[in-house]
Each structure stands twice: as structure tokens, then as C-alpha cells.
Image (cartoon, rainbow, N blue to C red):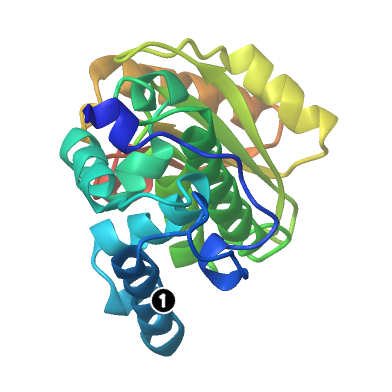
Amino acid sequence: MTRQSQFAEGPLPLFEPDETVVPVGSKACQPSYIRDHRRRLRDRFRSGGAQALPDYELLELVLFRAIPRRDVKPLARALLDSFGDFNGVISAPPARLGEVSGVGDAVITELKIVEAASQRLARARVMRRHVISSWDALLDYCHTTMAHRGTEQFRLFFLDTKNTLIADEEQASGTVDHVPVYPREVIKRALELNASALILVHNHPSGDPTPSESDIAMTRKIAEAAAVMGVTLHDHLIIGKSCELSFRSEGYL
């Protein structure tokens, strides 16, 4: 049996196959060891939550629906070998996921659903909230959406006079080490939204959040342009793989 056929995907059922009555002897019937393993894993998740499961078992739970009648543990481990951790797997681009043997459209769809849900939940914790009091949630959101990207992304957080976050927008995307940013467009958008303050955010796919000379120069240009128009630049955050750098804290602003 080839690795590809071992992880071949089946159509997604309305109910989980091991929770549905299946005639004995049917080709759709799961082997008992797979059915029992899946039940035990779900029970552990329900009783202990995500913290009770290592990354590969949490990933198995996601893969269960995409691959109803196969042992998905080897595929979960293969994905982690390729992308490092659970976050790296669900954040990986579809094209790269498809390079892993056994991954097809159904698996990619399940992973991208989890990614979209996690980003939406993280965003909900910061929108329309006071930024200072929800700073940790803002950093979590930045890491959730940007830390595992393979290319640079530049985002803008727009704040009102009470420092409440009123908008979160992607301003530009770039390559693995560069993203084009135009101060005029940044300030124009702030005025359109009637924003009183800004927070700039971009990621470094290398994982190292140390700012480059061009990062520093671009930030100063935006700060100067914002000041002329009465808009405050609160901070510029650079998101690395497991940490972030604040221009304000490091004395660049």
C-alpha cells in the first residue's frame, strides 16, 4: 500500500462515521482499533481540553473528518515534521500543504477552516476594545495571523480618540524579506476612517523581529506624515516566530 493511498480522503459525512450506525461487514465500517482510538481521543479532549493533548493528537482530531476511515496519526506526524508545530500546520499555504503525501483538498479545507476560526476568535477579542487594556490580546492576534506567514505582511490598526480599535486592515503584502509601504496611503486611509491614532504591524518570516534600516526609516516617515495631519503613531510592532519587537519600547519612536 502506498503512502498516498493509505491517507486517501473520503467524502465528508454529515455525522462522524464512528458515531453513525454502519452495517457490519460494510466497506464503510471502521476497524475497531481506529474507532476506539478516535473515541478515546475525543473523550480526553472533552474532559481535559486542548492542553491535555500534544500537537499531533490535536491535529488528529482535525484530520478525523477529512479522512474518515484511516489511521491519521502518521499523517499528523508528517505534517508536524514539515511545518514544526500545530500553528505552523494550520497556517501553512495550501500549495505547501499539498506537497505532503496524503494531503488533498479535504485535508486542506479542514485545516484552513481551523485557521480562519482561530483568526476570527482572536480578532473578536481586540476589535472595539481599548488597546492598552487589551494589549496582550492584540499581540496574540498579531501572532495568530502573521507569525507563520512565509512572506511579509503589513497591517494597520486604526484607533479613535479613546484608543479604541476601530479598524484592522492589511495594507500590503510582499516577499520573504520586503513589503512595499507608502506613507501617503497610510495617512490617507487613517483620515478616511477618521482615526486619531495608528499602530503599524508587520512580520519577519525569518523569525527574527530585529528591525532593518528600511523598517526604521519607513516608520519615521509615517510618524512625521501622521504628525502633520494630527494623527498619532503609537507603535510599530514587528512579529517574529515566537516573539515580537515594539518600536516604542525599544526607543525607535
x and y, in percent, of residue 82 in the image? 20, 33
Q: Is residue 240 above or below residue 37?
A: above
Q: Looking at the picture, how far across and down is residue 20, in whole percent? A: 62, 68
**At 25% across and 53% down in the image, what residue appears?**
73
Q: Is residue 219 left or right of residue 86?
A: right
Above or below for 14 versus 84: below
Q: Quadrant of the C terminus?
A: top left
Query: How many discs mark residues in the rendered view?
Result: 1
Q: Is residue 227 above or below residue 199?
A: above
Taking the spot 47% from the left edge, 38% from the top edge, the residue there is 107
Q: Is residue 186 visible?
A: yes
**Front position in the image: 239 or 2:** 2
Q: Quadrant of the N terminus?
A: top left
In this rendering, would 223 be left or right of 210?
right
Residues 124 and 63: in front is 63
Question: Horizontal and vertical percent for residue 152?
Answer: 39, 22
Above or below, 88 against 22 in this view is: above
Residue 123 vs residue 102, the one in the foreground: 102
How dense is the environment of label 1, judged by Cα within 10 Å: few (below 14), some, or many (20 and up)? some
Q: Is residue 200 visible?
A: no
Q: Amino acid at mark 1?
A: Arg
Where residue 155 appears, as percent x and y from the top left, is 54, 32
- Residue at 29 percent of width and 14 percent of height: 177
Residue assigned mark 1:
39
Q: Which picture quadrant has residue 11?
A: top right
Q: Quadrant of residue 149?
A: top left
Q: Secondary structure at mark 1?
A: helix
Residue situated furthest front in the rendering:
25
